[in-house]
Image (cartoon, grey):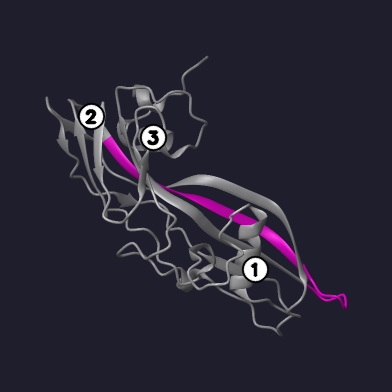
């Protein structure tokens, strides 16, 4: 199965899974229409903690999350363009929440989380670090145009790699701030063909979840291949 995917923003095209094609971006720029993450980035009222404290991160969770999926579309010989719109399932956000009391700068906390997960852009002192931007727009689910070669029943989908972790910020005088931060490090899209197994993906991978939702639970693409 050959897949042609036209991305409206600059991004790299790579295989997400066997039988899928993905288009990913670091999300450094708004991607069209989408929810403003700032609307879902609550912070608790309180005093500002010291500026030279240290972060400790724990309960780190990094996973690929399905953000949208289209209804399956049957194409005849020669394939064609996938025209079904993706329905939203999950809106990613950039947010920092705090326990009652003192707080720290949200961007500083997110940059620290970026360093913790090994993001080489986290330490740059500029305003273009999307992972720490609480006003970052969610990706536009229908910004890309996808075409396939060959007959089949196809489902296209979108996903993000979401990162969430709890933190404790400690000052030299013993003051501590506790909270949770969340953002996403990459977004992408893909296609599955309902009659083709997609390999042996882990349960919950976006391609498998999309196949189960749109192809149906009995479709070959929706089943985990037994080894």
Query: What is the C-alpha distance between the residues marked 3 and 2?
Result: 19 Å
Q: Measured from the top left, where is residue 55 in percent x and y?
A: 74, 65
The furthest residue to the left:
77
| Location of residue 220 (image quadrant) | top left
Q: Residue at x 46, y 68 (%)?
A: 37
Q: Give the range drawn in magenta.
A: 155-176
Q: Give the residue furthest to the bottom.
A: 47
The residue shown at (26%, 50%) is 144
Number of the label disc, if any, that sits on residue 153 = 2
User: Residues under labels 2 and 1: Cα distance?
Assistant: 45 Å
- Tally of marks: 3
Q: Are marks 2 and 1 in contact (CB under 8 Å)?
A: no
- Upstream in sequence: badge 3 or badge 1: 3
- Magenta run includes residue 30: no
Check the image and report above or below for 138 versus 208.
below
Q: Is mark 2 on a helix, strand or loop?
A: strand
Where, by quadrant of the figure, is residue 84 drawn? top left
**Label at residue 15:** 3
Vertical relation: 17 (above or below) 94 = above
What is the crowding at mark 3: few (fewer than 14 residues within 10 Å), some, or many (at least 20)? Answer: few
Residue 109 badge: 1
Percent of width and height locating residue 127: 50, 73
């Amino acid at each position: 199965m050959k897949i042609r995917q036209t991305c409206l923003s600059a991004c790299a095209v790579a295989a997400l899974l066997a039988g899928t094609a993905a288009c990913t971006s670091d999300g450094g720029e708004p991607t069209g229409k989408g929810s403003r993450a700032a609307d879902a980035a609550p912070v608790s009222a309180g005093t500002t903690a010291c500026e030279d404290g240290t972060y400790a991160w724990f309960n780190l969770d990094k996973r690929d999350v399905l953000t949208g999926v289209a209804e399956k579309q049957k194409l005849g010989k020669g394939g064609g363009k996938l025209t079904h719109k993706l329905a939203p399932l999950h809106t990613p956000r950039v947010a920092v929440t705090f326990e009652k009391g003192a707080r720290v700068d949200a961007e500083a906390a997110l940059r620290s989380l970026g360093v913790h997960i090994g993001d080489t852009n986290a330490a740059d002192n500029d305003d273009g670090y999307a992972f720490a931007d609480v006003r970052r727009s969610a990706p536009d689910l229908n910004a890309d145009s996808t075409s396939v070669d060959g007959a089949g029943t196809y489902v296209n989908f979108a996903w993000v790699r979401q990162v969430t972790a709890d933190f404790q910020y400690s000052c030299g005088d013993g003051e501590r701030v506790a909270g949770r931060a969340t953002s996403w490090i990459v977004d992408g899209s893909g296609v599955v063909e309902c009659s083709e197994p997609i390999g042996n993906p882990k349960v919950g991978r976006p391609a498998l979840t999309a196949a189960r939702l749109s192809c149906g639970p009995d479709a070959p693409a929706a089943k985990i291949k037994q080894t």
